Structures are given as C-alpha cells and as structure tokens.
Image (spheres, rainbow, N blue to C red):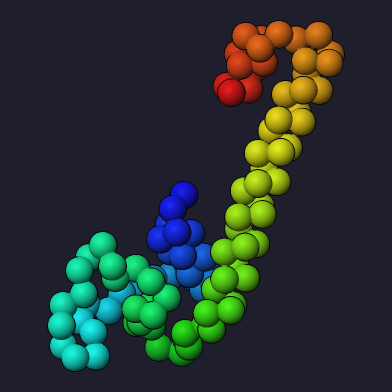
Amino acid sequence: MNEQDWLRTALANMHSGQWFGWRKTDDDGNKIPNDQRMTYENVVVIKDGITKPTEAEVNAKIAELQQADADKETKKASGKQKLRDLGLDDAEIKALIGV
C-alpha cells in the first residue's frame, strides 16, 4: 500500500462509519488538487461527537497496521515452510491454501 492508502486505512480503523473526509480548499480558498488532498493536514471530521485524532495517534495506528501486515506475511511464509518440511511440494501447497 502507498502512504495515502495507509493513512486512509488507519483513519477508517480509528472510528466506525464514515467519520472523516478531505478538505477541498486550502485556507486561502485555493482548490487542493485531488492527488494532494489525502494528507493528515487535510483530514476533516464530518461526524458529530468525534474529534480529529492527533497526527501522533494516526502515525501510531499506521505503524500498528503495518506491523500486523508484516506479521501476516511472516506467518504465511512460516506456514508454507512447515508444509514443505512435512513433505509437500509447492504445487501441493498452492492447491491446498491457494498461495
């Protein structure tokens, strides 16, 4: 995932429902190009009762999600190796678990 995807995923995991959006104009009223809108600075809260998390909180959530993703890949590789150690070849492993 790219940086914007991680930001969007982290924000989505911090509260339920659609609680945030992206600013369309800067403080001077200039339109923010779509490819530049998805940054922490441009996050706006659109749901009552929710406050914007700090940048540190968002970065911590991103790090947590990235670590979980890395752990998943490590476990996948470990599981495949254990199946090889049991005597399965790569074709059998792929037929069994699809990867």
Relative to 70, say whether 23 is above or below: below
Task: Report which quarter residue 57 is drawn in.
Answer: bottom right
Q: Which quadrant of the structure image shows residue 5?
A: bottom left
Q: Vertically, is 6 above or below 78?
A: below
Q: Quadrant of the C terminus?
A: top right
Quarter location, residue 82: top right
Q: Position of residue 85 (x, y in %)?
A: 83, 16
Q: Residue at x 42, y 75 (%)?
A: 40
Give the farthest residue toward the right. Answer: 86
- Which residue shows up at 20% across the image and 69% down it? 33
The image shows residue 35 at horizontal and vertical percentages of 26, 62
What residue occupies the far left of the structure in this picture? 30
Q: Is residue 94 in view? A: yes
Q: Nearer the viewer, residue 26 or 68?
A: 26
Query: Residue 20: in sight, yes or no?
Result: no
Position in image of residue 75 (x %, y %)? 73, 37
